[in-house]
Amino acid sequence: MKPVYYEHIHTDKYSGARYGILHTPHGDFETPIFMPVGTQATVKTLIPEEIEKVSDGLILGNTYHLWLQPGDEVVKEFGGIRGFMNWNHALLTDSGGFQVFSLSKTRKITEEGVYFNHYKSGEKLFLSPEDSIRIQNNLGADIIMSFDECPPFHSDIKYMTESVERTIRWAKRGLLAHENKNTQGLFGIIQGGGNKELRLHMINELKDLDFAGFSIGGLSVGESKEEMYEMLEYLKDVMPFDKPRYLMGVGSPDDLIEGALDGIDMFDCVLPTRNARHGSAFTKYGQIQVKNQSLKLSKDPLDECDCYVCKNYTRGYLNHLVKSDEILGQRLITYHNLYFLKNLMRNIREAIKNDRLFEFKKEFYNDYGYKMKGRI
Amino acid sequence: MKPVYYEHIHTDKYSGARYGILHTPHGDFETPIFMPVGTQATVKTLIPEEIEKVSDGLILGNTYHLWLQPGDEVVKEFGGIRGFMNWNHALLTDSGGFQVFSLSKTRKITEEGVYFNHYKSGEKLFLSPEDSIRIQNNLGADIIMSFDECPPFHSDIKYMTESVERTIRWAKRGLLAHENKNTQGLFGIIQGGGNKELRLHMINELKDLDFAGFSIGGLSVGESKEEMYEMLEYLKDVMPFDKPRYLMGVGSPDDLIEGALDGIDMFDCVLPTRNARHGSAFTKYGQIQVKNQSLKLSKDPLDECDCYVCKNYTRGYLNHLVKSDEILGQRLITYHNLYFLKNLMRNIREAIKNDRLFEFKKEFYNDYGYKMKGRI
């Protein structure tokens, strides 16, 4: 049996959204699912017992960061990321590619791999597809990613073609390098920016290879929402149906709903945790700045919500914590924001099961204050 | 019945250390006790459920900070600090005096009160003894403090005398201003720096007034440990026996033991929480810098300790968190450091009950790596 596979259960008969189960060595997860980001083997501010409550049990770690600090060999010594951070559930790691391209000021891409500089020290570093897989084998996540280049959405056709062809070759090299085929599922990553032909080409090149699932990279990287949604709608019908589909780096409430409508099964994003550290909270009626003066005297909870934070603290107290730069404020809002997305995904799944994701979208958008966009 | 009073139970027959019960409206506490500091209505990084586990249920809030942000009237609206931060146990507030003198670059002391500048904005502010009590009445702690000047330990005799006389007058004015005599116990504060005559004079002036207890201020403010211990030894025999004795701002393990030996019942200090945020942890064998390279591969717990952190995380993981500037590192070390002091105080009380605080000191110092000092 493959360590990671997708079991399709239901298709929303109006939208075509997918409800299914993602099977992993450390848990089976209803999809669509949102995965909190635990960049440095910690979902910022939270302990694992709290992550359990605000996630579905599948979180993400960043290969790039853990390779540099404390080092993947060190993490392996502690039983992988799961043992290191005392997380008893499932885990996914990215390939490191995105950070190589986004965090380094200079880099040189060769067929062999990428030369770049350490994002803090400036030290010269090199990462190849085989390195990425070896590091991810050491980090020991249930789901791992092919090493890819993430070219800008609007790259010219010549560069985009070269990049896509190279990433295809890298994906194949990664498959060969993968040593834990019985315990870790390797996903291929579909790049190609805004170019549908190249996206389709990449899918055709990778779909019959031994990947456990497919990720969509290179979206939510600066293009407009309309451009992203158009690409997602296109990909919906051409991605392999029987494999899990993971839209990387996407996590605003509207994008989660739109992604689900386009058959996405998995999402991750730093948005809920990063926003929280900047004092911004998701609520049923839209995002709010917690330090806003209007909250100062409010004895209401942060949101109409049954999470620990909303049951125990007032907006007024949270306002005070954020104004006072107190870590507890960041911690409590992080908790709520993640819970908010967990709850949103639960509602999305429920809606798909009942063939009413379009209606749910309408209701959610109406409360949240989003303007309706694209198809209803 | 007075809201706050001390019940003496046992005197260590060799050292003279006191074991007793501090009665408050929100709990009775075995003494000597250490009180974690929750400056801005939060013990930094922790939720109340955690503070319960790492304290004995009595914590401190800072009048100065809460007066300025969000304002004592606001806090009162939320049910006082306890309601505001969702803390269901007991609380003590300081008078604000210490911050007025330590945080403001300039200030002008008059008989009426102190003119000074906001520690951040520079705004001109004024605080009188009556203001301090009124603010503390609004903040609603079980135990509140007289407004005092905290002169430098080595002030000249003329200044120290003037200061002490004024603080005596301020203490009397505070007593008159105190409006919640049935629900909040007001402590007098003994100042006088390194001058024993003035300390004694102040005690004589205040001891028969209606104070619920007495604080010792102006120690641990830059004088040597020997000077502090000499003063504590002197005060031991002249402080009122039937009232709780609170040594303000003291919290290193050796000072807690020395203070207990000199009959102190209550302590507070930012040391365990502030140190934690700088990656420094208390352990049985002394303080350690958690980011020290020697911990990188260690699978040992932080300390020989049964706290949540020591049961669930390795030194190696904590080393990684601190090196990576992760908030979770600050949070976990804060938790352990407070638990360490809670446990130390429990051991001190046990030793007093068994007339063996001197022996305990010797054992603790030996493990911790402290040199023995003063009396053994």
Image (tube, coloured by chain):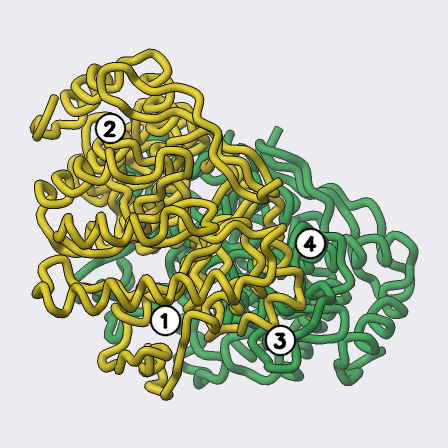
Chain colours: A yellow, B green
Which amino acid type is marked by label 3? Answer: Lys
Mark nearest the camera among 1 and 2 is 2
Name above or below for residue A115 compared with residue A155. below
Q: Are marks 4 and 3 in contact (CB under 8 Å)?
A: no
**Measured Cα–Cα span from mark 2 to mark 3:** 45 Å
Disc 3 sits on a residue from what chain? B
Q: Which residue is mark 3?
A: B296
Secondary element at tag 3: loop
Q: Position of residue A207 (x, y in %)?
A: 37, 47
Mark nearest the camera among 2 and 3 is 2
Mark nearest the camera among 1 and 4 is 4
**Measured Cα–Cα span from mark 1 to mark 2:** 59 Å
Q: Residues within 10 Å of mark 1 (few under 14, many from 20)?
A: few
Q: Which residue is mark 2?
A: A261
Disc 4 sits on a residue from what chain? B
Q: Position of residue A62 (x, y in %)?
A: 43, 61
Q: Which residue is mark 1?
A: B102
Quadrant (top left/top right/bottom left/bottom right) for the N terminus of chain B: top right
Instruction: Pick whichever of labels 1 and 4 is earlier in the sequence.
Output: 1
Q: Which residue is mark 4?
A: B342
